[in-house]
Image (cartoon, rainbow, N blue to C red):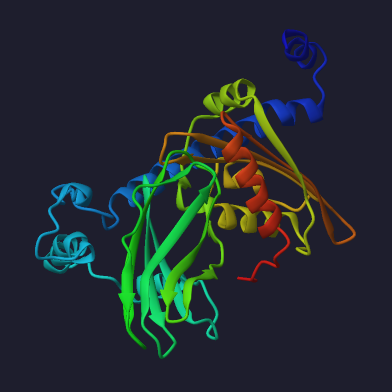
Amino acid sequence: RMIVCIKPLAKPQEADVDVWLSACRSAYDGLIADRAKQKEDEEAEKDQRPISQADDLIDFYHLKSRKGMSQVEIEDAVATDLKRATGFGAGKDEKKSALERVIQLTGFSDPVYAEAYVTVHQYDIVMDVTVVNRTNEVQQNLALELATMGDLKLVERPQNHTLGPGETKHIRANIKVSSTETGVIFGNIVYESTGSDRNVVVLNDVHIDIMDYISPAWCEDNKFRSMWAEFEWENKVAVNTTIKTVREFLDHIVESTNMRCLTPPSALEGDCGYLAANLYAKSVFGEDALVNVSVEEQDGVVSGFIRIRSKTQGIALSLGDKITLKQRAKAVPK
């Protein structure tokens, strides 16, 4: 570096003078402007409406008594009243999102129709399963049997029920989550009826999305490089997409993975045919997810690689599967 600095001083040329006196200053000005804008964005995020109030009641529903109330009523009563009192009711977007979380577990022609509403609370998953008797017979000892794959654990086995013809029951199952990893919940419904001791209806699998556990985060460039060198698990995903431009592809990946782009906007400006950017996110369990996007555009085709690094294998593989699935989708033009 010292030789490079001494050379233009000894034999100054017009190109060298322009780089040292003008280009370096403008690059530093751009860096300062990016840091200032980033700080303004962080302050604006702090002023947004809080997700939860500081004095919100923490409801340990597993420890509550069930006398005189159903489990659903116990869990929802306090939280619902508090949200109504503070004005934090569900808006149109939240209601739409709630409907999207309803998963059909059985077919309409099955003797038992079941659908589940899956709610993800940071460290546990609540499945509200609605069961309907579609037959003209009484279904006795109807049991919801669930099993899990991944770092998921069923807290307690739901109790048995008896359903009359056309009757509907709501069954709740609680599942413990121990790490950020894509999990699968599967199982069946077992019941007894007239003329048959045991009837089994197999349920559709419920896939738990890793996006429910990670959120955009920010860290310094030095810390990012340090974690990148430290983390041992890496997943390399080849780019395979129909998106035509590298910037549009980056925006699509950022939106699909719920991560934050650490590369400043000024470094992504221009149209040079290639792009490299760093993305960062943090899970509710304190796990770091690092992503490096390196892509280029040739003849309208975007190619390259996406490298994912993390401290644990689960988040690296799960995030890689998510990117592989989402990158093929065409981004909606803005």
Which is nearer the eye, 118 or 70?
70
Number of marks in the rendered image: 0
Q: Is residue 158 visible?
A: yes
Q: Residue furthest front?
A: 195
Left/right of residue 11 with respect to residue 39 in the rendered view = right
Q: Is residue 17 above or below residue 76?
A: above
Give the image location of residue 285, x and y in percent: 42, 37
The residue that appears at 10% across and 60% down in the rendered structure is 67
Residue 122 visible at all: no
In this orientation, which residue lies closer to the viewer: 66 or 177?
A: 66
Q: Which of the image's four quarters has the C terminus? A: bottom right
- Residue 179 position, x and y percent, is 47, 39
| Residue 14 image offset from top left, x and y in percent | 80, 29
Residue 306 lies, in percent from the top left, at: 72, 43
> Residue lying farthest right?
299
Q: Nearer the viewer, residue 246 or 119?
A: 119
Quadrant containing the N terminus is top right
Of 266 and 297, nearer the camera is 297
Give the image quarter of residue 299: bottom right
The residue at the point 73 percent across, 30 percent down is 19
Picture quarter containing residue 313? top right
Q: Is residue 246 left or right of residue 120?
A: right
Instruction: Say whether residue 65 is left or right of residue 156.
Output: left
Up the image or down, 51 lies above or below 96; here it is above
Identify the residue at horizontal 34%, vertical 59% (top origin). 158
